[in-house]
């Protein structure tokens, strides 16, 4: 075999190795992390002409939620940890209207709407249960880092930690922020994806209070 032939064979093997390595990297990393959860900006903050193709409108999510529940409006139950490390189930709060918000510290749209939740909690906290459920993956968000984030921003609403993905699985969370309004009977009244304005959050609260 000539030196030229050997060189060509070695070159081809290097090219195959590079292509194979690139494919393996993309395959192994495609499902890694906040990548599993898309940060959605609400319609309030995006122009209709500039929406991305994968943006899910609030109305679309309402329809999808109803189809997924097979017309059964009962809110799926789940268990999370409170700030003291004690387990808390959603169903324990049935009897009062409930606002559930799924969020993470790395989610920009989640941060945008948090002042609205803080304001509504201070105004309606005695009438409505607020469950601010953090997607605590243990890497990007830990219990300690989330507590630090809440303290630094001066938020007083109750924060819960979904360390076992129980809430995320129960509600099929793949985009955040996600807000569900549940009436006192434990039925889902509204289910929204995207950062909410103060007005829209107030509308949800008024709806679940009236049920």
Image: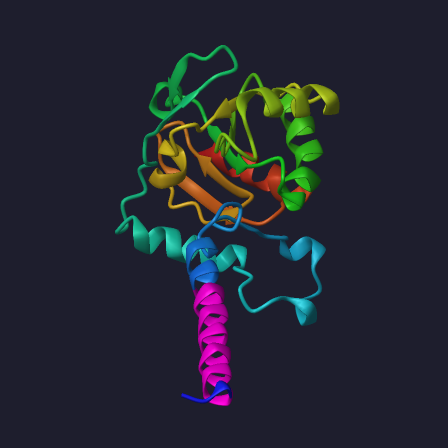
Q: Nearer the viewer, residue 156 or 85?
A: 85
Q: For the stretch drawn in magenta, what is the main secondary structure?
A: helix
| Left or right: 8, with 124 as reference point | left
Determine whether, in the image, residue 43 is placed left or right of residue 177: right
Instruction: Look at the image and give the residue range highlighted in magenta.
Output: 4-23
Q: Quadrant of residue 147?
A: top right
Near-viewer residue (65 or 112): 112
Quadrant placement of the N terminus: bottom left
Image coloring type: rainbow
Residue at x-position 31% and y-position 37%: 74
Say which quarter of the image contains residue 50.
bottom right
- Check the image and report above or below for 52 versus 171: below
Tell me, yes or no, if residue 59 can be seen here. yes
In the rendered structure, the answer to whether residue 101 lies left or right of residue 41 reads: left
Q: Nearer the viewer, residue 8 or 179?
A: 8
State the quadrant of the C terminus. top left
Find residue 183 and report its horizontal and vertical position in percent.
Answer: 42, 32
Q: Is residue 202 above or below residue 3?
A: above
Residue 9: within the magenta?
Answer: yes
- Number of marks present in the image shown: 0
Can residue 129 be spotted in the picture? no
Q: Position of residue 96 (x, y in %)?
A: 43, 22
Quick check: is 16 in the magenta stretch?
yes
| Left or right of 123 on screen, residue 38 | left
Q: Residue 81, how many percent across, how many down?
A: 44, 19
Looking at the image, is 195 positioned above or below residue 2?
above
* Residue in view at x 56 percent, y 69 percent: 53
Check the image and report above or below for 24 versus 167: below
Q: Residue at x 38, y 16 (%)?
A: 87
| Rendering coords of residue 99 (x, y %) | 50, 32
| Front one among 179 and 87 | 87
State the residue lying farthest toward the front. Answer: 2
């Amino acid at each position: 075999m000539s030196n030229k032939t050997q060189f060509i064979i070695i070159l081809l093997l290097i090219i195959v190795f590079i292509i194979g390595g690139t494919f393996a990297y993309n395959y192994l990393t495609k499902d890694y992390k906040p990548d599993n959860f898309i940060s959605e900006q609400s319609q309030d903050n995006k122009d209709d002409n500039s929406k991305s193709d994968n943006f899910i409108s609030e109305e679309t999510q309402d329809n999808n939620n109803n189809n997924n529940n097979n017309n059964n409006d009962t809110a799926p139950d789940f268990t999370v940890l409170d700030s003291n490390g004690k387990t808390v189930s959603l169903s324990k709060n049935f009897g009062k209207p409930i606002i559930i918000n799924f969020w993470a510290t790395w989610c920009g749209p989640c941060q945008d709407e948090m002042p609205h939740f803080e304001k509504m909690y201070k105004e309606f906290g005695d009438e409505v249960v607020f469950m601010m459920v953090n997607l605590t993956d243990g890497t990007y968000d830990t219990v300690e880092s989330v507590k630090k984030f809440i303290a630094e921003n001066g938020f007083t609403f109750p924060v819960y930690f979904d360390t076992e993905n129980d809430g995320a699985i129960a509600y099929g969370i793949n985009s955040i922020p996600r807000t569900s309004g549940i009436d006192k009977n434990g039925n889902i009244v509204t289910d929204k994806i995207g950062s909410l304005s103060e007005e829209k959050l107030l509308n949800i609260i008024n709806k679940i209070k009236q049920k």
